[in-house]
Image (cartoon, grey):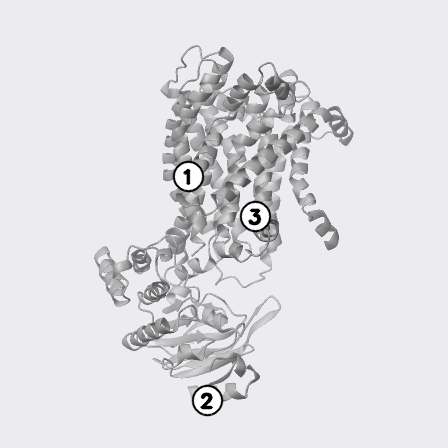
């Protein structure tokens, strides 16, 4: 019953994430002491409520979109097609949150929706912010739900099919088996949504906790205990997730898996390809059309010129992404392997990693700036821009830790023990590493893309000569929001993200295999 | 309904280009217990899955009793066939306790809470699982897992019992114990039983007749002695532990 292990691990991670939310205030106090507090910060209940509303909308949208694509990918039998749908579902991650937000803003302005919505009062703004966040974060739900699906055994569902109809099997077996994965993904979405400032900043929504902290930093106020106040909306969001997920599941599942049970689908059914290909095109086009409205590549020569003019920004972005990903992968990977089969002893290190993740990026940045920018060796190191690697990599190390721990848990202990006669390097390279390779690629991609798209921490830790693309775009938006240069910058960000995704595939021999196929 | 007759005629099934079953024919009389013997990859499990409705053949017909359950334009859902299948890997649900397994099956039957409790209690006792009713599959011993899989299959009172290598991972004393339980249930419940194995000793004393599956079709179907005689002459004979 080794397949039960990831399931329990995911459930445990969900609980740990909750615990991290509760431990967060302690870390906030430590951070606040670094920020040289001057005056207490008030946190009216309305801020909690608004943050909770945004997170609830983000979770609803992300779960609906992410689960739909994940279950669809899971039901397709052709491996290459399944990979295509999986990539399409992960596509929103390539687009930084801020750029996604800008695109949505452009769309709503062009359609005249934004003005109408804005006239409706602050609640409509909250819904828009939640919707934009949810659309982008659906990739998290998609990937984690899909991972959950692949940890299920087809026989479990077939055993259910022998006793009850498909609806019963979905409701009573598939739902409970997938629920921990969906809940974990929803929690991650909620945490990112509550701690994000880029989209509220873009849509000028100030009445949320993250923004209150953000402006408090500029006003020189003390955010002692303020992050602790974020626990309440997070718990509210959790309750909302618990209420929303089952009905959503009941509605979505029958539509998605109709006529797709193994017993009812002859293998190699032809129409499947057309159906799935159409869906992939629809998903990519929907994202592409959205981005096109913002990006608008007017001419390729202008695009090339923008590339040339922004080589400094591109190299800073790439080095930051690679550096932070290296920190996160190294530390997170080591943590995952250390966790291994250690039972309850896995709890404290994982809890620390989760706390790193649940504290907003800009708070880490404020603390890092306070401590590292002092004169002397610390200041010299800060000037090199490498501190950003530590801050971003440290905050995101939980992503590779969790993904690699899940992949590691699926490998049985006896498989590793069978290679005891080998030296440690051969055992690592020949036995432990191969099953982790795909998980490591996913973890790297998630970390690198989140670093490329990061605005919250990068804007506070911005240094001359080390400005990243998203910060550069944000700065230009203030000068000329509708200029072709801004659109080109967004295109450059997308291209850089795609290149960063392709990098490990090329390094790991993907290019060689591609040439062999050709 | 009493034990039905099973009849399979001209079943073909190929996965991509690999033909697994080629003109598979088999008849099992009502209330009989038939063993299906074959080497690994001969299509034994696939044959059971077709009977259970978990695979759909490209050609051929399957009848359970008087009803065509799989045929040209006809396909009866697995849960409407009155068939119970014990999977080779048992396929126990990792998130449910032993009682939870049986309760879920009883719920699928639409029983009231009182009826469910009574039925679940009866099967827990019958399969000697009462003391481990609150344990999940990974907390059960190999024999308890086998008995739980059997109880889960039999609780809906199927008319046909399909066993896919049910004793493959058990030691001999446990095999004899489980064989006695299966024999008792087969007779007590008036079932038509089809049991698949690659090991003759698993079937010995349990089955009424033996069908030998070779290259996707039944090469011989008769008494144990006839099957053994066929295997002795067959190049595949050395693969069976006869």
Q: Are marks 2 and 1 on the same chain?
A: no
Helix, strand or loop at label 3? It is helix
Whole-angstrom CA distance, mark 2 to mark 3, is 52 Å
Q: Are marks 1 and 3 on the same chain?
A: yes
Find out whether the residues at labels 2 and 1 contact each other: C-beta distance under 8 Å: no
**x then y, percent, for residue A393:** 56, 31
Chain bearing tag 2 is B
Helix, strand or loop at label 2? It is helix
* Residue depicted at x 49% and y 61%: A262
Chain bearing tag 3 is A
Q: Determine which residue is flagged by label 1.
A: A347
A202 or A353: nearer the viewer:
A353
Q: Determine which residue is flagged by label 2.
A: B226
Question: Crowding near pointer 1: few (<14 within 10 Å), some, many (20+)?
Answer: some
| The image quarter in which residue A318 lies | top right
Q: Tell me which numbered mark, 1 or 3, is placed earlier along the sequence.
A: 1
Q: Is residue A250 above or below residue A385?
A: below
Question: Crowding near pointer 3: few (<14 within 10 Å), some, many (20+)?
Answer: some
Q: Determine which residue is flagged by label 3.
A: A436
């Amino acid at each position: 019953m080794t397949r039960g292990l990831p399931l329990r691990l995911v459930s445990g991670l969900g609980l740990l994430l909750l615990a991290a939310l509760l431990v967060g205030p302690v870390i906030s106090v430590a951070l606040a002491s670094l920020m040289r507090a001057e005056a207490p910060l008030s946190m009216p209940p309305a801020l909690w409520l608004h943050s909770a509303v945004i997170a609830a909308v983000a979770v609803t949208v992300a779960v609906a979109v992410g689960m739909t694509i994940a279950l669809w990918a899971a039901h397709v039998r052709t491996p290459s097609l399944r990979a295509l749908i999986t990539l399409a579902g992960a596509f929103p991650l390539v687009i930084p949150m801020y750029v996604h937000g800008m695109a949505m803003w452009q769309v709503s302005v062009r359609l005249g929706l934004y003005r109408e919505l804005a006239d409706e009062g602050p609640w409509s703004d909250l819904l828009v912010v939640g919707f934009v966040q949810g659309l982008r974060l659906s990739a998290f739900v998609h990937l984690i739900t899909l991972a959950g699906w692949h940890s299920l055994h087809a026989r479990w569902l077939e055993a259910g099919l022998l006793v009850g109809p498909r609806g019963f099997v979905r409701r009573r077996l598939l739902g409970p088996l997938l629920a921990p994965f969906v809940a974990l993904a929803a929690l991650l979405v909620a945490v990112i949504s509550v701690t994000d400032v880029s989209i509220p900043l873009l849509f000028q929504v100030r009445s949320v906790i993250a923004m209150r902290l953000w402006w408090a930093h500029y006003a020189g106020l003390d955010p002692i205990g303020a992050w602790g106040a974020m626990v309440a909306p997070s718990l509210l969001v959790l309750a909302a997730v618990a209420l929303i997920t089952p009905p959503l599941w009941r509605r979505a599942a029958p539509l998605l898996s109709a006529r797709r049970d193994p017993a009812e689908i002859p293998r190699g059914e032809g129409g499947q390809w057309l159906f799935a290909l159409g869906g992939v095109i629809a998903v990519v086009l929907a994202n592409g059309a959205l981005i096109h409205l913002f990006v608008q590549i007017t001419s390729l020569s202008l695009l090339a010129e923008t590339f040339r003019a922004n080589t400094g920004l591109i190299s800073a972005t790439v080095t930051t992404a690679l550096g932070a990903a290296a920190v996160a992968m190294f530390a997170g990977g080591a943590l995952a392997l250390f966790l291994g089969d250690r039972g309850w002893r896995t709890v404290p290190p994982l809890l620390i990693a989760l706390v790193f993740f649940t504290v907003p990026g800009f708070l880490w940045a404020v603390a890092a700036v306070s401590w590292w920018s002092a004169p002397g060796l610390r200041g010299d190191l800060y000037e090199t821009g490498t501190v950003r690697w530590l801050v971003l990599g440290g905050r995101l190390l939980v992503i590779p830790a969790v993904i690699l721990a899940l992949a590691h848990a699926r490998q049985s202990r006896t498989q590793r023990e069978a290679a005891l006669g080998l030296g440690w390097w051969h055992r690592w390279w020949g036995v432990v590493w191969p099953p982790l390779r795909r998980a490591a690629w996913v973890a790297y991609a998630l970390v690198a893309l989140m670093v490329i798209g990061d605005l919250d921490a990068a804007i506070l830790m911005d240094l001359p000569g080390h400005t990243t693309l998203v910060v550069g775009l944000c700065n230009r938006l203030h000068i000329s929001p509708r200029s072709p240069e801004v659109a080109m910058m967004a295109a450059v960000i997308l291209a850089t993200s795609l290149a960063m995704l392709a990098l490990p595939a090329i390094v790991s021999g993907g290019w060689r295999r591609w040439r062999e196929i050709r | 309904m009493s034990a039905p007759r099973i009849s399979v005629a001209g079943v073909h099934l190929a996965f991509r280009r690999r033909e697994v079953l080629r003109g598979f024919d088999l008849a099992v009389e009502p209330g009989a217990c038939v063993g299906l013997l074959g080497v690994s990859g001969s299509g034994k499990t696939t044959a059971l899955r077709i009977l259970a409705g978990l695979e759909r053949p490209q050609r051929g017909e399957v009848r359970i009793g008087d009803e065509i359950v799989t045929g040209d334009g006809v396909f009866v859902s697995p849960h409407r066939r009155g068939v119970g299948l014990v999977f080779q890997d048992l396929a126990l649900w990792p998130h449910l306790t032993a009682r939870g397994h049986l309760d879920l099956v009883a719920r699928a039957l639409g029983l009231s809470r009182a009826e469910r409790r009574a039925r679940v209690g009866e099967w827990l006792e019958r399969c000697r699982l009462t003391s481990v009713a609150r344990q999940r599959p990974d907390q059960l011993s190999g024999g308890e897992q086998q008995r739980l899989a059997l109880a889960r299959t039999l609780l809906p009172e199927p008319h046909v019992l399909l066993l896919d290598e049910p004793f493959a991972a058990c030691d001999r004393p446990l095999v004899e114990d489980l064989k006695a339980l299966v024999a008792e249930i087969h007779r007590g419940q008036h079932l038509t039983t089809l049991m698949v194995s690659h090991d003759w000793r698993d079937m010995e004393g349990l089955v009424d007749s033996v069908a030998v599956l070779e290259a996707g079709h039944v090469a011989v179907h008769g008494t144990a002695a006839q099957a053994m005689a066929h295997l002795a002459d067959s190049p595949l004979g050395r693969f069976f532990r006869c």
